[in-house]
Image (cartoon, rainbow, N blue to C red):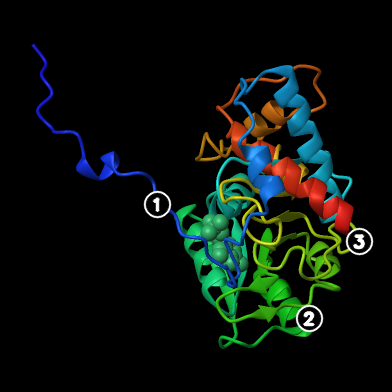
Amino acid sequence: MLSISIPRPKCLQKPLAVPQRHMFGPGPSNVPPRIIEAGAKPVIGHMHPELLQIMDDIKSGIQYIFQTQNPMTLAVSSTGHSAMECAFVNSVEPGDGVLVAVNGLWGERAMDIAERLGSRVNTIVAPPGAFFSNAEIEQALSKYRPVMFFLAHGESSTGVLHPLDGIGQLCHKYNCLFVVDSVASFGSAPLCMDQQDIDIVYTGSQKVLNAPPGTAPISFSERACQKIFNRKTKPVSFALDLKWLASYWGCDGKPSRVYHHTGPVSGFYSLRESLAVFAEEI
Ligand SMILES: Cc1ncc(COP(=O)(O)O)c(C=O)c1O
């Protein structure tokens, strides 16, 4: 016979207390009432047609904010780190060469993720606060011949906004994917994915978009999809497998959606509203 032996937590008997705060860091940022209200709408099923329509709206919003026509555009059901892992887990196979620009914390994290995947990681390193010239990047691309080059657009640990122009073309010259972390920079600095030849870009809902944390816009170019969908091994993560995500988000051109996971319904409402606000303002 089962009996309850752990007492009710006393802390949960007190009302939830959350202070009003002005958030001046890179994120999370304050969430305006319109976006909070969107997130408070009734929860519906994650495969209900109305929610699938909301996901389609989100897709269009992300294509707008990243200025891309990529059909493979969606929101990861988690924070920026998962979008980062989604980029790596899908694109990199064991033994693949990865080049990471390290000029702060986010380059170091990218290196860690790439190492965990069994890739051959090479770095270009600059002191915190510094950045890389296109000549330095090209030299490393030609020396290491990686399949992927990672760069943080906004290195939030130091405040460096890295120039992006010309790097995508350099990567493509060496048959390499250009991956940009725009979690801290997106919306505060110009970024046009297609024009800048970026293959994978991601951000987080909780920064410039002013939505609560928990969803992460990401987009993949045709070139990235070619690499991802022709891999010899399955990505090590089921939750972040782009084939599954694509069928859940309707990015695979097929008429019906396939259940992959239960999307964060309320988070999707907030994200949709934040994208609508962004599109009204910019
Ligand atoms: C540049 C950059 N990349 C990635 C992340 C990770 O995002 P999250 O904390 O949403 O997982 C952050 C978070 O501050 C960031 O500033």
Neighbour tally class for label 2: few under 14, some 14-19, many 20 plus, Cα within 10 Å = some
For the residues labelled 2 and 3, the Cα–Cα distance comes to 17 Å
Above or below, 129 relative to 19: below
Horizontal and vertical percent for residue 112?
A: 47, 63
Above or below, 275 relative to 249: below
Horizontal and vertical percent for residue 76?
A: 62, 42
* On-image quarter of the C terminus: bottom right
Residue at numbered disc 1: 17
Asked whether, in this view, residue 170 is left or right of residue 258, the answer is right
- Residue 55 is labelled as none
Residue located 75% across and 31% down the image: 54
Residue 261, quarter of picture: top right
**Label 3 vs 1, first from the N-terminus:** 1
Residue 100, quarter of picture: bottom right
Residue located 25% across and 45% down the image: 11
Q: What element carries label 1?
A: loop
> Callout 2, which amino acid?
Asn
Q: Nearer the viewer, mark 1 or mark 2?
A: 1
- Residue 195 is labelled as 3
Residue located 78% across and 59% down the image: 175
For the residues labelled 1 and 2, the Cα–Cα distance comes to 50 Å
Neighbour tally class for label 3: few under 14, some 14-19, many 20 plus, Cα within 10 Å = few
Q: In this orientation, does residue 132 appear?
A: yes
Q: What element carries label 2?
A: helix
Q: What element carries label 3?
A: loop
